[in-house]
Amino acid sequence: MDLVTNHHEEDGWDVLAVTGEIDLATAPQFEREVSEYIREGCRLCLDLSGVSFMDSTGLRVLIGALKGVEENDGSLRVVAGDGPVAKLLTITGLDERLDLYPSVAAATGS
Amino acid sequence: MADRFTLEVPGRPEHLATIRIFASTLARRFGFDEDTVADLKLAISEAGTIALLGDDESAVRVDARSVERGLDFEIATGTAAHAGDDVGGLDLIRALFEGAAPGPSGSSIVIPLRRPAGS
């Protein structure tokens, strides 16, 4: 299944909504698109609630994004939903490292 | 006598999804619930990724064998069966399926799928 991303701005946040499956085949695209919004002082919200499958290749992109955002004094917020992404974050303990929100509205404060 | 099922796909990342569909279809056919199927898809994808990163030239082969209370999946990984890192690989597979381990030859990963006793 292809990975589809959609970007919009909301209350000063770059919101990148992702749907589809993230694995070794699609992680490079995910990484490329996320990196477009990492810059000085960025405020990036990744909406992964529409991701139907993600394995550790997607986690590595999230870890890289977190590092990139921190190095640029920015903020990264993640909407994981209640499906496979949330479960994977919990199993691996990454839910403790990422700033998770239940919805885009909650993440952007809109 | 055990039933055997085999899938072999070209060793390219775009076929990981095919491997997941194969494994999840079999698991459903054998009566496993959707939570278990979701865990299996993740474990199979991790094993397939190990295979692809270890040797991206070869085909990826998945064998499944019916056993008394479920299925044994075996994914050929070449020499990289022990591969893992901070967030994925064999450690993640074991977190999902406690009995998962490198196969006898050391060049595969075996993922046992079992129904609880009495179910």
Image (spheres, coloured by chain):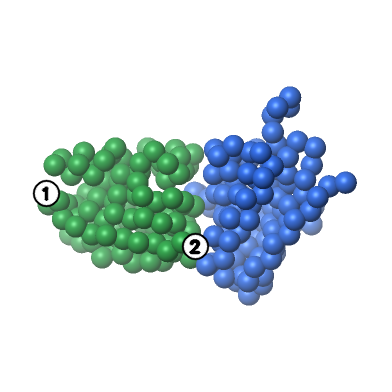
Residue drawn at 31 percent across, 60 percent down = A5
Q: Is residue B111 left or right of residue A65?
A: right
Instruction: Return the residue at label 1.
Output: A11
Please state which amino acid type lies under the numbered disc 2. Answer: Leu
The colour one sees for chain B in the rendered image is blue
The local crowd at label 1, few if under 14, some if 14 to 19, many if 20 or more residues have their Cα within 10 Å, is few
B56 in relation to A60, above or below: below
Q: Which mark is residue A24?
A: 2
Instruction: Answer yes or no: are tags 1 and 2 on the same subunit.
Output: yes
Residue A10 image position (x, y, % from top left)? 14, 51
Asked whether B64 or A57 is in front, the reply is B64
Comparing B97 with B24, the one in front is B24
Q: Which chain is green?
A: A
Residue A94 sits in which quadrant? Answer: top left
Looking at the image, residue A98 sits to the left or right of residue A26; the answer is left
Question: Please, which residue is most extreme toward the right here?
Answer: B1
Determine if residue A86 is in view.
yes
Q: Which mark is residue B1?
A: none
